[in-house]
Amino acid sequence: MLAVLSVLCLHLCSPVCGVFQKLYCSISDNCECDFKPNIRDLEWDLYKNVYGQHLAQDIVSEEVARFLQNKSPERPLVLSFHGSSGTGKTLVSSILGNHLYGSAMSSPFVHTFVPALHFPSPDRVQQYREELKRWVLGNLTQCARSVFLFEEMEKMPPGVIDILEPFLGPSHVVFRTNYRKAIYVFIGTTGEEVILREVLESRQAGLDREEIQWADFQDAIAQAAYNSSASGFFRSSVISQKLVSRFVPFLPLSRRHVERCAHSQLCQRGSCGRGDVVESVGGDMTYDPVPGHYFSTTGCKAVPAKINLFL
Ligand SMILES: *[C@@H]1O[C@H](CO)[C@@H](O)[C@H](O)[C@H]1NC(C)=O
Ligand SMILES: *[C@@H]1O[C@H](CO)[C@@H](O)[C@H](O)[C@H]1NC(C)=O
């Protein structure tokens, strides 16, 4: 019976099969929704389309592959992306979402939370906590393989995400749902100073960007997020209980990375040959810290607007 329902579910797909799926998921640990992960495509997409982020590319590929190999993981995968604006955090999260489900990022099982939209007022933490718990619980009941993206964590009122503590940890029974197959991704700028300092130091020490190691950042980022009152992780038990599987640093981008972004966007518009525009876009960005003119302050974010200006 279970098998029949599951097959039905897989073939009928979301809206039609809602009722079956709910029933199936409620009596089985095995509800996989339209989960069709493609790790190879994920890796390829990350390497081809994300510039200057060897750590993020490696960590996300490795962690997701390892997590999905395990048919019954002991805890969910919890990634926290840190870095300044325009370095590719949102891009990487959508690349991830795009290679997990049949219907890619438009899958009903990818849930995106934006503080300005879902949690705008710092006075309503209690209400938000209840809502968030109800949503996550409801979403996990529908699909154990749900993905939750939390954007702009630097704008999230502190205290809200702590309600997720029981979902993020390894304990066995939470509200009868198998919540350990879920993937959580937190995204924010908190820790950008720590990352910048580390990158500058390794540069001054004569290291290549690609020689920067992941381990150099973990504690520093965790502390920065925990200490910063402008962070949804401020004094959060999610940090102190070590519920984040990996902190993922996004390094500041230099001019050559910005120019690669410009080149690839020009190609998408059918103007691959416009080296002059690439050059102008690269030259028109602000680079910081000023003496060395090292890193673009806006990463690849302002690139489309600049292309419009110069094309
Ligand atoms: C799933 O989460 C969304 C918010 O992203 C919420 O609107 C929706 O009601 C939730 N679904 C269930 C079944 O709780
Ligand atoms: C965070 O706060 C602790 C305790 O106050 C302090 O020791 C640590 O240096 C701080 N870390 C950062 C990155 O601010």
Image (cartoon, grey):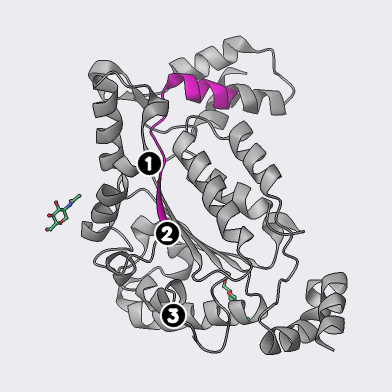
Queried whether the magenta region covers residue 66, the answer comes back as no
To which residue does mark 1 refer?
A: 214
Q: Vertical placement of 154 versus 46: above or below?
A: below
Q: In the image, what residue occupies the spot 69% across and 23% down?
A: 267
Mark toward the start of the polypeptide (2 vs 3): 3
Horizontal arrangement in the rendering, residue 308 relative to residue 232 (left or right): right
Tell me the kind of residue under disc 1: Trp
- Which residue appears at 33% of the width and 63% of the height? 232
CA neighbours of label 3 inside 10 A, class few (<14), some (14 to 19), many (20+): few
Q: Which residues are magenta?
A: 246-262
Q: Residue at x 65, y 23 (%)?
A: 266
The answer to which image quadrant residue 275 occupies is top right
Instruction: Residue type at mark 2: give it.
Output: Ser
Marks 3 and 1, how far apart at CA: 28 Å
Identify the residue under disc 2. 245
Query: In the shown orientation, is residue 43 left or right of residue 244?
Result: right
Q: Is residue 229 visible?
A: no
Q: Position of residue 109 (x, y in %)?
A: 66, 68
- The answer to whether any part of residue 8 appears in the image is yes
